[in-house]
Amino acid sequence: MSDGTAGRADLVVVGAGPAGITAALAAAKRGRRVTLLEKAARPGVKILISGGNRCNLTHDCEAAEIAKAYGRAGGRFLGHALRELGPRELRAWVESLGVATKVEPGGKVFPVSDRAVEVRDALEAELTHAGVEFVGSAAVEAVEREGETFVVVTADRELRAPRLVLAVGGRSYPKVGTTGDGYAFARALGHTVTTTAPALVPLVTTTTWVRELSGVTLEDVVMTLSAPANTGAKRPITQRGALLFTHFGLSGPAPMNLGGSVAEQLVGSVASVTIAINFLPTTERKELDARFVTAMKDADPRLVRTAVTELLPRRVAEMLCEQANLAPNLLLAQFGAAARARLLDALFATRLSIAGTRGFDFAEVTRGGVPLDEVDPATLQSRRVPGLYLAGELLDLDGPIGGYNFTAAFATGALAGRCAAEA
């Protein structure tokens, strides 16, 4: 790698995250002179903090499942990229670089070492081996087009190339440099940018009892986000997964997967949105009610809250009984219809007011970006600017937690880099 001034290249790649790295490698391995620019001193900074510093590299599934997770439009757009580098191929490639991987319950793929730095170091070494000129500490200040040449300007150099890949990322985790710079570059070259919002982000609530459960994890809940009355025709959005109560509200896969939709709805005069939580998604409400009725008829001497602790962790069970306004000493033998209805509502449809998210500082990805219809999915070349390719989080493309977004970033980078090299 070099930190010297570079004047011309066959391809300049801006941004050395997963998308930028794979784009640079794909082009360099096809004989192109590639310069990879990165704001940070070394490549792969976001890789280092992903998955709790363990790097949730991808998901153990077929490419079709990755595509499905992005919905109809996103999945259709990703089709070509996932054929270029799907989750199976991505895992095999990383292992070929010397990084052993493992699959954890739920399908997340991590390095066996649980060290994200191992993935980053392997990719960094591969850049050197492929002959990519990496230039670190090189924040791009401007991107222009002069005729058929792209001019990329940093504080101490000016690079010219007939092909350019923008893989700068979005606005999530700005502390590592992803501050939305790529949107300005895309606009300057003729693209539009949709409204951006933090996604895969924890939720904030002012409800006191939620904070009192801080530290408690539930492995399986269903959360439903209802659209505010003044937002029109949006349908409720449902997510299932683990939930962590925190000092600020809710974290874990289920609430974080709702984060982007919450952020989208909290605009204008909308001060809060409502979510409903089903704490017992594997149990039918009618079935549980029937069990309570039978216990009452049999004069069961147990406390109601004791029975609920058989279904949920004690702190959660007791809190939901309290929220249902049940007397602490209420017996199952005395469990009448009105009290049962209140408890069942709490167990299957607790409603919470969500005041916001923790914002881009704590968001794993960005929702919004360059519209997909402005980019050719078969090549990732701009439909507006010949020779410009866009990859990764800069696109209006975000998926669920679990390695899906890294898979899309690596895949779009690989496709963009190959197509730029072959153009």
Image (cartoon, helix red, strand yellow):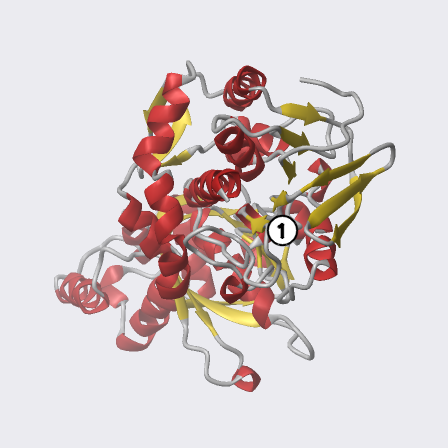
Q: Position of residue 97 (x, y in %)?
A: 43, 17
In this rendering, the answer to whether 225 lies above or below 160 is below
Q: Position of residue 29 (x, y in %)?
A: 48, 26
In this rendering, the answer to whether 349 lies above or below 19 is below
Please state which of residues 147 and 91 is positioned toward the viewer in this rendering.
147
Residue at the front extreme?
Answer: 147
- Please state, as top left, top right, bottom left or bottom right, where the N terminus lies in the image: top right
Q: Residue 49: which quarter of the image? A: top right
Q: How many marks?
A: 1
**Which amino acid, by three-letter code, is at mark 1?**
Phe
Please state which of residues 166 and 178 is positioned toward the viewer in this rendering.
166
Q: Which residue lies at the image location 28% right of the left edge and 40% below the top edge?
A: 61
Please state which of residues 422 and 95 is positioned toward the viewer in this rendering.
422
- Label 1: how many residues lie within 10 Å, few (<14), some (14-19) or many (20+)? some
Residue 330 visible: yes
Please state which of residues 77 and 378 is positioned toward the viewer in this rendering.
378
Q: What element carries label 1?
A: loop
Q: Where is residue 328 in the image (x, y as percent from the top left)?
A: 41, 58
**Left or right: 278 in relation to 214:** left
**Left or right: 226 in relation to 268:** left
Q: Look at mark 1 in the image and give the residue it sits on.
A: 248
